[in-house]
Amino acid sequence: MRTSINTTKNENGIAVNNGFSFPIFTGSTTFGYYSSTSNKYKEHGRSISDKENLYVLCSDWVEFICTGEAPIDFIYRTQTNKNIMVEKISVHKNPNFRNLHRIYLHGVEVCDIFSVTNNGTHLYDEVSVKVANAILYTTTWVDLVRQVIHSLNLEFVRMARYDIALDGMELLKMDGILNKFTKSHTIQINNDAIKVLPVAFNKKELRWTGWSLGSKKSGISARYYDKTKEIESSGKKFINEFWKRNNISTEQVGRFEVQLNYKRLKKYRIDLNNMELLTNAEFLGTIFQQELRPWLKFYRVKRRDVLIHRKETAIRRGREINLIKWNHIPNKMELLEYYIHTPNSNVINARNTISFALHEIMRDPNTSTTAQADIIEHYAKKYHLSDYVQRKIKMLFGNEIEPQYTQYLQRFLHR
């Protein structure tokens, strides 16, 4: 039987349960971020310690459900925050929703909002908000997300998915254990319901390098892979900077991710007001251990015990493999100081002006003038926003431009 966390509080406001205790932070809390090292000296923005840390913890996927009273397009046109921009994405991979809008604040991608349910998985007024991966490694991501949610008048309902990633060179030993697990009876796991499947293969070395563990539908699943090689193809260089800030060797780093859905997340009572918890390494480490340790255990057993006796007997006579050194799980981390490039205010104002002019043409083409099209062309040339104009026209007017709009938009259609 699993016990929950955050179910009781003592007289000091500390949530206590299951042997763990940590403070409940609210949205008004001023939060600082520190390196996972205990050394206080810093050099060139990086903490210095006598030896590098084994691991660093981080949030790698944050997705939650909100409710809204109107379509995202309408909400965007009526909201008053001029620093927010919305881009409609025509193709996406979420089967539960029809529309996807990418939300920018001050020119920085903050989140994707999926809306208009396709099936019975969600209520008609529910939307799914997925925080942009890059900002999860910065100090300001919770504040940016709150600004967007409040500006779009959305109301938080529940967490949908949360991924905790543990990074470190020490994790690379999982690769050998998992490869041996698929080839030999001498490595066993405690739970037969957990399927361990290889998902990435190195043709040069003739071995598997990525693994999927468990089922996403069960509430908890996991993945292991070489994060250093993945960054080479994905281009997520900000993660390298994150490792450096937390004294993690960047030469070759393994990643073990635990994915939790609502079935597991509801007991932690995470909402928009206390989402700073997801930037606290102590809180992340508590969830990581609470969920992973009883769920997945590897054992080194004797082959004859597996062949002659029951699996339970072989495991009882075997020895547990400590894939993770739990006493080295960090309780602090240092997030990036807004590593992501922010465009200057002139570009933001230019995009706002273009968007406003296009909305005016769409609202009433009979009273529109060629001066509006001239303004759009001027700002598009000055700030190199031609691609933005074409995407915006496609989003607002569709692929087929009606005749009444053609005289204003034809100069932007064939570039």
Image (tube, grey):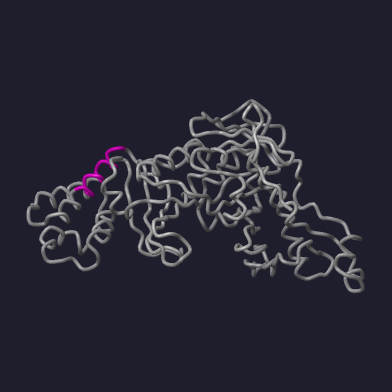
| Range of residues picked out in magenta | 345-356
Numbered circles on residues, count? 0
**Left or right of 104 in this view: 35:** right
**Left or right of 76 in this view: 43:** right
Image position of 345 with respect to 122: above or below: above
Q: Residue at x 75, y 44 (%)?
A: 326
Q: How far across and how far down the image is residue 95, in percent? A: 46, 66
Q: Nearer the viewer, residue 68 or 224?
A: 68
Q: How far across and how far down the image is residue 235, in percent? A: 50, 53
Q: How far across and how far down the image is residue 351, in percent? A: 26, 46
Q: How far across and how far down the image is residue 203, in percent? A: 64, 70
Q: Which residue sits furthest bottom?
A: 307
Image position of 120 with respect to 382: above or below: below
For the stretch drawn in magenta, the main secondary structure is helix
Image position of 53 with respect to 129: above or below: above
Residue 96 among magenta residues: no
- Quadrant (top left/top right/bottom left/bottom right) for the C terminus: bottom left
Residue 351 among magenta residues: yes
**Left or right of 258 in this view: 90:** left
**Left or right of 208 in this view: 143:** left
Q: Residue at x 65, y 37 (%)?
A: 8
